[in-house]
Each structure stands twice: as C-alpha cells, then as structure tokens.
Amino acid sequence: QVQLVESGGGLVQAGGSLRLSCAASGRTFSSYAMGWFRQAPGKEREFVATITNGGGSTIYADSVKGRFTISRDNAKNTVYLHMLTLKPEDTAAYYCAARLVGTASTLSSLYAYWGQGTQVTVSS
C-alpha cells in the first residue's frame, strides 16, 4: 500500500508560481513512476506531467510544457511539480499518482495509487 499526500496548493495571481509536493509512504518509492494530474470543475481529469522512477525521463502535457517542471527526490520519497507563469486555466485540483512500475505514463488508468489532491487557484 502506498499513501500519497500532496501539499503546496493555494491562491496565486496570474503569472505567479507555486511548487507542489507529494510525499509518499513506503520503502519502494524509487521503484515507482510518478505522475501529476489535474481536474477542473466540470471537466475530466487530465494528465499534467510524469517522471520515471529514477527521474531520468519526463513527459509533459502540451498545455504546461515550458512552464511546469516535474522532479523527484527518492531520498525524501517526494515528487514535486514546480509551476511557473501560471494562468487562470491552470486552476484545478492537482493530484499526484504512483505507478507500480518505473515507466512513466500519461494514462491515469495505469496509476495504482492517488493522493487526495491539492487545490490551485489562479486569479486573473
């Protein structure tokens, strides 16, 4: 069983930045690929970013490419999402998720564990 706890969300003005953190329980965090997804009110959950278990490879949604950076610290069992130049359309609940394999994926159905989410609100 893996427990994921997100933090770092909040209210920010357009153009601002935030860093989300996701702390994972368990001793095998370094085996898991991790992902960030988001869901805005009335919309489907969408992929944001993913990173392989070792951190050597990342994939981003086109909508965040160049503005968001996913990273991880396996010694701290934590994955991060550093968000720059935030836009009102980035407003959503952000969720981190863990795969039980090391390969990154953009598909939410391939993630076994999910956090409870952290809200990001970007005002215009």
Image (spheres, rainbow, N blue to C red):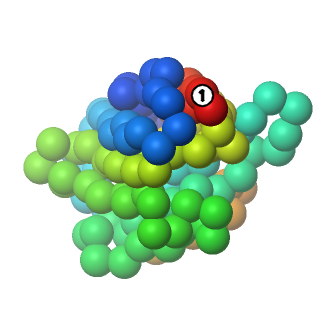
Q: Horizontal and vertical percent for residue 65?
A: 52, 68
Task: Please indicate, yes or no, whether residue 116 appears anywhere in the rendered image.
Answer: no
Q: Give the camera-side residue of 122 and 51.
A: 122
Say if 75 sits above or below 5 in the image.
below
**Residue at x 49%, y 22% (from the top left corner):** 11
Quarter the N terminus occupies:
top left
The amino acid sitting under disc 1 is: Ser
Query: Would residue 123 be found to the left or right of residue 25 on screen?
Result: right
* Residue that protrudes farthest toward the bottom in the picture: 57
Q: Mark 1: give few (<14), some (14-19) or many (20+) Cα within 10 Å.
A: some
**Residue 108 pos. (x, y %):** 67, 55
Residue drawn at (57%, 31%) of the image: 122
Q: Quadrant of the C terminus?
A: top right
Q: Is residue 35 left or right of residue 17?
A: right
* Mark 1 element type: strand
Query: Percent position (x, y) of residue 48?
Result: 58, 56
Name the residue that disc number 1 marks.
123
Q: Identify the residue at image location x=30%, y=58%.
A: 71
The x and y percentages for residue 64 are: 55, 61
Q: Residue at x 64, y 63 (%)?
A: 63
